[in-house]
Image (cartoon, helix red, strand yellow):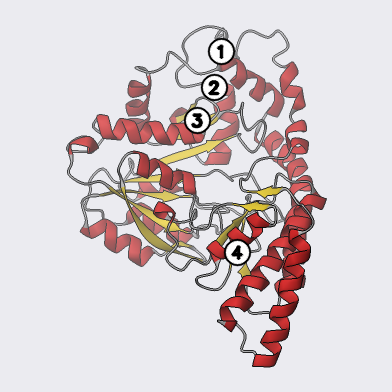
Amino acid sequence: MTTELSADALSGLLEQARKDYQDLAGRGLSLNLTRGKPAPEQLDLSADLLSLPAGQRTAADGTDVRNYGGLQGLLEIREIFAELLQVPVGQLLAAGNSSLELMHDCLVHALLSVLPGAESRWAGQERIAFLCPVPGYDRHFALCERFGIEMIPVPMTAEGPDMAVVERLAAEDPAVKGIWCVPKYSNPDGVCYSDATVARLAAMSTAAPDFRIFWDNAYAAHHLTDEPAEIADLLAACADAGNPDRAFVFGSTSKITFAGAGVAFFGSSPANVQWLLANNAKRSIGPDKVNQLRHALFLKDADGVRAHMERQRALLQPKFESVARILEAELGGTGLARWTDPKGGYFVTLEVPDGCAKEVVRRAAEAGIVLTPAGATHPYGDDPRDATIRIAPSYPGLAELEQAIEGLAVCVRLVGYEQQAS
């Protein structure tokens, strides 16, 4: 990645980088790019939810949404998201506000009860492992750590996880029970899985009969361009390949409406849906149907979701464009960094020279710019190359974001040139 420099040229660049950093540290900044939260302006787009359901007490089928029951969720909200998540309505559950909660529960239920197709519950087995495409989502990794599930890193490519590695590991090791996937606008690098990758995931041989793909389609409708990405239908591909129970599909409205008061979804085969419903019946008598009804009334249909997400895009796209513009202006041609240009989702991945990410994050924090910890994009918080930094542009205002990215670029130049000079 680095560009060859003469000793004199490097000395001059390093001296300037040190001056720039001193100026940065003297500004007294307090900026935070740690998490991909919707900005207040994005949340304001859904303000009408607060006045719904405006006295309406019943769902379309006559269900009194104020009362117990309805573990599968309201039909009208499932009808809206079935198309967006590529799950038949009858195989889609609508739950509480968090898809992460659903992933947590699926792991717990698999540990404590027997999955369809399984020989025994996971907790009774000596070793459980998951394949983890990297860079990836830190909260997926945190769930594995929480339950003592071994994590096996798998490299990402421009088409999704390296399927040669995935196929080999899944076929040779019966302890490998699943894989984490963010198939559209992946967190954090923005990759969209190719049709070939989806087909191979659906059809590959697995040593574990109860292997599951945890398909976290968090950014199904989160486009940043006029050409929305489309991904193949995993659930249909698994059924066609003779592995109908392989896919667990997750999604939510967390970054569509209110992050703290949305609706989460689970989709899978009929057998898996019945398995989850039976287990969930022990922990809940039904989800928040009032909230599901207000979402159905507010969003109306799949086209209503798309129109709403265009309004979200109008707020987000300028931020992502600013990140790209500033990184190019400040780091382009230096050989000190590469970065992604995502077409959707919530993150930009910045790659710095090996051995520099932690120091860049440390220097940024000392200058008042807080970033996601280096290593968060890898299992156990360990990026073997110490090169990946996740940028979350969504929450800060545009002026604050631009200050933060300019400051981050200063830190990259300082640390990068220091490394070359050492």
Residue 289: give x, y in percent of width and height: 56, 16
Q: Earlier in the sequence, mark 4 or mark 3?
A: 3
Name the foreground residue: 240 vs 345: 345
Compute the Cα span from label 3 to label 1.
Answer: 15 Å
Q: Earlier in the sequence, mark 2 or mark 3?
A: 2
The amino acid type, in three-letter code, at marker 1 is: Asp
Compute the Cα span from label 4 to label 3.
Answer: 47 Å
Q: Which residue is mark 4?
A: 360
Name the foreground residue: 241 vs 370: 370
**Can I make out residue 17 in this image?**
yes
Q: Which residue is mark 2?
A: 75
Crowd tier of the residue under label 4, counting other residues whose Cα lies within 10 Å: few below 14, some 14–19, many 20 or above: many
Figure quadrant of the C terminus: bottom right
Which residue: 67% across, 32% down? 257
The amino acid type, in three-letter code, at marker 3 is: Val
Q: Which residue is mark 3?
A: 89
Which residue: 34% across, 65% down? 165
